[in-house]
Image (cartoon, grey):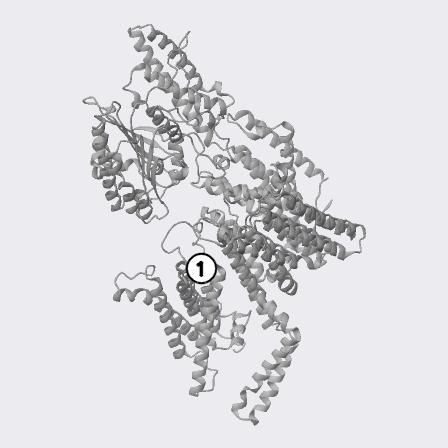
Amino acid sequence: MKDTDIKRLLYTNLLCVFSIFLSIFIPSFFVDNFSVLEAHLTWLCICSASVTTVNLLSYLVVKPNVSSKRSSLSHKVTRALKCCVCFLMSCFLLHIIFVLYGAPLIELVLETFLFAVVLSTFTTVPCLCLLGPNLKAWLRVFSRNGVTSIWENSLQITTISSFTGAWLGAFPIPLDWERPWQVWPISCTLGATFGYVAGLVISPLWIYWNRKQLTYKNN
Amino acid sequence: MRLGSGAFAASCVAIEVIGVAIFIRGFFPAPVRSSARPEHDAETPAPEPVAGVRSNWTKLPPPLFSKVVIVLIDALRDDFVFGSKGVKYMPYTTYLVEKGASHSFVAEAKPPTVTMPRIKALMTGSLPGFVDVIRNLNSPVLLEDNVLRQAKAAGKRIIFYGDETWVKLFPKHFVEYDGTTSFFVSDYIEVDKNVTRHLDKVLKRGDWDVLILHYLGLDHIGHISGPNSPLIGHKLSEMDSVLMKIHTSLLSKDRETLLPSLLVLCGDHGMSETGSHGASSTEEVSTPLLLISSAFERKPGDIRHPKHVQQTDLAATLAIGLGLPIPKDSVGSLLFPVIEGKPMREQLRFLHLNTLQLSKLLQENVPSYEKDPGFEQFKMAEKLHGNWVKLHLEENHSDILLGLGTKVLRHYLGALKTLSLSLSTQVAQYDMYSMAVGTLIVLEVLALFLLSTPHVLCRKAELDVPLLSPVFSLLFYLVFLVLSAIHVLVCTSSESSCYLCSLSWLAVGAVMLLVSALFCAILSALIRMVIDSTLLKKNAADASSGWSEVNLLLLLGTVGHVLSLGASSFVEEEHQTWYFLINTLCLALSQETCRSYFLGDECEPQRHSHVEQQCVNLLACPLQDSTSYNTPESGTAGKRVSLLEAQGSCKWWTVLASPWLVLLCCRLLRSLNQTGVQGAHRPDFSHWLTSSDHKVQLSGLAALSLVVIFMLVQRRCSLVSKVALALGLLGVFCYRAAIGIVQFPWQSDNKGISKGIIEARFVYVFVLGILFTGTKDLLKAQVIATDFKTKTVGLWEMHSGLVLLAALLLRPHNLPVLAFSLLIQTVMTKFIWKPLRHDAAEITVMHYWFGQAFFYFQGNSNNIATIDISAGFVGLDTYMEVPATFLTVFGTYVGPVLWASHLVYFLSSEGNNSALSRSCFCYALICSVPVATYIVLVTSLRYHLFIWSVFSPKLLYEGMHLLITAAICAVFTATNQTRHRRA
C-alpha cells in the first residue's frame, strides 16, 4: 500500500465533505432567508444532487476500480441503467424500513422519501460507483474481512457511519425540548449527514493509522 | 452448599422486592390532608371565643369585597413588575405599586413550578403532592376543597377566560367560560387576544361576582426567546393596558356599590434565565402578587414595600375577602394588610378562623401536634382573644383594651406563621433513612448479580455459596451489630417521622440480617473472583472473540435503555425506546440471516471446489474467444442455485422473510394504540374501533383474532385442552357480546345488556381446567423421569391457560395484540431461534425486549391513568379486592408474562439442562439493572421539576414489574427443580 493512494483517498473524501458544505452555503446566495431547517426539503434535494455529482466525478477521475475490460457503449449504458435501478430500489427499500420503524405512513410521505434518497446517496451511490451493480461484491465488502483495497475499506466505514448517524439522529425526537430540528425527519437527516461527514474524515485517518496491520488479498 | 443459578436468581429478586418496597415507602411522603369529607360543606363555622360565656357572633364575617377580578399572567416574574422592566413597560402598574391603593407582595411558589399544580396551590392553599394523583387517579378534576367550589356553593357567579386547564380543574363551576389551549407555544398573540376580547362586554355588565383571566402569552414568549427578549416588553405593555382598563372600570363601579371590589394581579410561576420553568430557582419561584382595591387607600407619606409571602396564602385571603370558609387543606396564612383597616374585633375574628383551620389540619396530620410551638402560641392567642372579647363586651374603652388587642394580634400572626411553616415542611420531607436502606439492599443485590454473571454464563450453571465459613460468620455478626447500632442511633436522634423507626424490632432485625447476609455474599463472590482471575482472563478472551452483532446490540440496547431513564422525556416516551430497540433487533436478525445464507462459511469445501473449477476454466481460456469469459460466472451462479435448492428453497425464503414479517407486525401494532405524551392527540385504531359506529368491524376483528389465537395455540395441546381452549375462546366472545361491546351477526341491537358474569365464569372454568391439566402433566413428568414430551406439553398447556385468561381480560380491540404476540412467537421460534442457534442468554434478552414492547403495544404507558381498571371486574358482581387486584395486574402485564411463559416453554423443549437456569439468571439480571439504576436516579433527581408527574409513576411501575419478575423467576425455579430431580 502506498501513501499516495491514501492521500488520493483523503482528497476525494474531503471533496465530498466540501460538496456538503457548499450545498449548505451556496443556496443562501440565490434564495433569500435560506435555512437548512426551514427549507429542509430543498436542502435535501440540493445535498443529494451535489454528493451524487461529486461521487460520480471523483470515481471517474480517480478510477479505483479498473477491472472492467469491456468498453463498448451498450455495455456502459446497460451498467448505468442497472445502477439507476439499484439506486431507486434502495430508496424504496429504505422508505419501507423507515415506515416500519414508525414513520407516518400517510402523512409526511415526501419528507420520508427524501430522507431515504439522501441516505441512499450517502450509502448506495458510493457502492454503485466503486463496485457496480454486483450484489456479490457488495456482500463480500460488507462481510467480515472481505475488503480488498483501501477504497472498499473507506466505503465500509462511511456506510456504517451514515447508518449509525441516522440511527442516533432518532434519539432527540421523543424529547420535549421543542426545538425546530426535533421533528421527523430533520433530526435523522442531520444525524445521517454528520455520520457521513465523520466517516469521510475518519476513514483515511484510520487506514493510515492501521496501514501496517491492514493486508489485502490482492496486494 | 450448591445452589442452582435459577434458585439463586429467584432469591435475589425476592430480596430486591423487599428493598424496593422499603424505598417506595420512604419516597412517597404522607399527605397533609383534612380527613373531613366534602359533604360537610354545611358545617357551621367556629364561634368567636369568649371567656366564660358563649359569643353571639356565630356566623362568618361579612365579605370585604363585592367583586373579585383575578388576572393571572402565566410565567410573570416578580422583577417584571417590581423591577426595571416594570418601571419601563408597566407604568400604570408601577404607579399603583408605589402610590396607588394597593398592597404588593412577592409570592413564593413551591416546586414543581408548572401551571396545573400552581393553579391548585392558588385555589386550595395546599401543596399538591404526588399522593393526590393517586387519590384522584390522575383525574384532572380538582377534588379538594377550594375557593371556587366554596364560591359556587355560596351562589356566586364565576366567569373565566384563559388557559383551558382551569376548565378541566373546575368543571361546571363557571357560568361563562372560554378556554384557550396552552399546547401551541409558538402562539403568543392570539392566545391573549382571545381573552381580552371578552373584557369590554363583561366589564359593562354587572351580573358576576368573580372574574378570572389567565394570560398565556408571556409564558410562550419566555419559552421561545427568553426573559430578555424585546417581545417581553411589548407583552408587559399589553398586560399593563389590560390592567388599567379593568381597574378603571372597577373604580367607576365602586362608586355605585357599598362594598369595594378587589383586583388581583399574580403569576403562577416565574421563569428562569432561559425562559423555561418547572424547577426551583429563585427566578422561577418568585411571582408578584398585587392586590388593588379602593379599600387600600394610602395615607399621605405611606410607603409600602413588597413583602415576601407564600403563594398558598392567596386562597385564605380570597376566602376571607369573599366571606367564604377557608379551604380545609389550606396551609396558607391570611395576608394581614388586607384586613388592617377593619375594626379590631373583626381583625381578631378573621385571624382566629385562619389559625383554627391550620391547627385542625395540624392535629389531623402530626401525632405530636401539642408540642408544636405554633399550636401552643395559638392556644395562648385564643385565650387572650376570649379575654379581649369579654372586655370589649363590657364596653370598656380603656387603653388596656387597645394594648391587649395589639398583643393578641401579634400572637395570632406568630402562630399563623409557625403553623404554616410546620405544615409546609411536613409535605416536602422524604424519609431519607428508609430510602437509604432500600437503596442499599437493591444495590447489594445488583452487585451480587454482576459479580456472579461471569461465573454463571461462562461456566456451569450452579453457584457455590459458602455459608458455614467461620470468617464469614464473624464478619456477618460484626456487620449486623454495626447496622443495628446505626439504626438505633438514627431512630433516637431524628425528630421527623420515619417508617423504619415505626416498625417493630423483629422486622428491623430481619432487614438488618438481610443486609448483612448480602454484604457477606458480595465479599465471598469478590474473593472468589480474585482467586479465579486467570480463568476470568481466559473466559474474557473467549467471550471477546465470541461477541456477534446481535450480542453487541442486546448489550448496548440494555445499557442505553437504562441510561435513558434519567431523562423525563424518555420516561414519558419509553414505548418509543422499546419500539426502536425491537426494530433494530429485527434488522440485525435480518442481517444475520442474510449473511448466514448468502455468504456461508469460508472454510466450506465448496469454495475449494469453486477455486478448482476456476483454475480449470482459466486453463481453457486461451483456447476460446474473449466473449466466452462469462461462462465460469454463469456456472458458479448455477451451482449456487442448486446449492440453495438442496437446502430447501421454501425454508430459505421464510427464514429471510421472517424478520421483516415481525417488523411489519410491530408496525401495525403501534398504530393500534397511541400511547405516550407527544402522540396523545393523534387518532389511533382503537379509538376508531371502540366508537359505537364501528361495532361490526370490532366484532369481526375480535372474532378473527380469537380464531387466529386458537389456530396458533392448539397445535401442541392435548385433545382435551384443545376442546377446552375452543370453548373458552367462544366464551370470551359471548362475554363481550353479553356486555354489549361486540355483537353476533344475527343479533339485533335491542338485546338487553347484562354484566356477563355467567359467561366470564364459564371461561374461568376452562382457564382453571387447562392450567390444572398442565400442572398434572408437569407433576407426571416429575414422577416419571424419562417422559420428556409430557413436560413440554404441560408447559405449553400452562401457556395456553394464560393466553385464554389474557383473551378474557383484554379489551376486544386489544385482541389483535394477543394474536400478533403469538404469531411473532411462532415465527421467531420456527425460523430464527432454532435455525440460528442462539444461546440461552440471547434468547432471554430477546424475550424480555418483546415482552416490554408488547406491554406498550397494549396501550399502557408510564402514566397511571392508562391502567385498565375494568380488567379487575371481569366475572365479579361485587368488588373483591384480592381477585380484582390479581386480574388488574395480570391484565396490565399480559405482554411480559406471556413472553416469559413462552421462554420457559421454549428452553424446556430445547432439552438443554443448564439453559433454563442460565435463562432465569439472565432474566433476573436484566430486570434488576433498570430498577437499581432507576432508584439511584430518582434519589438524585428527587427535587426535579417532573419528579411527581413523570418519575414517580414510573417508580411504581418498576416496583410492580420487579414483583412480577420475582414470580416469574419462582416459576423458572420450580420448572428447573423438576428437571434437576429427573437428572
Could you tell me which quadrant the N terminus of chain B lies in?
top right
Q: Is residue A152 above or below residue B486?
A: below
Task: Give the residue at the far left of this rendering.
Answer: B300
B56 left or right of B21?
left
A60 left or right of B956?
left
Residue B697 is at least partly visible in this image: yes
The residue at 42%/30% (across/down) is B126
Residue labelled with disc 1 = A104
Along the line of sight, the residue nearer the viewer: B106 or B775: B775
- Quarter where residue B383 is shown: top left
The residue at 41%/22% (across/down) is B418
Q: Is residue A100 above or below residue A63?
A: above
* Count of numbered circles on the image: 1
Along the line of sight, the residue nearer the viewer: B615 or B332: B332
Q: Is residue B657 above or below residue B161?
A: below
Q: Residues within 10 Å of mark 1 (few under 14, many from 20)?
A: some
The amino acid type, in three-letter code, at marker 1 is Pro
Give the x, y percent position of residue A210: 49, 67
The residue at 37%/47% (across/down) is B183
- Quarter where residue B839 is shown: bottom right
Q: Secondary structure at mark 1?
A: loop
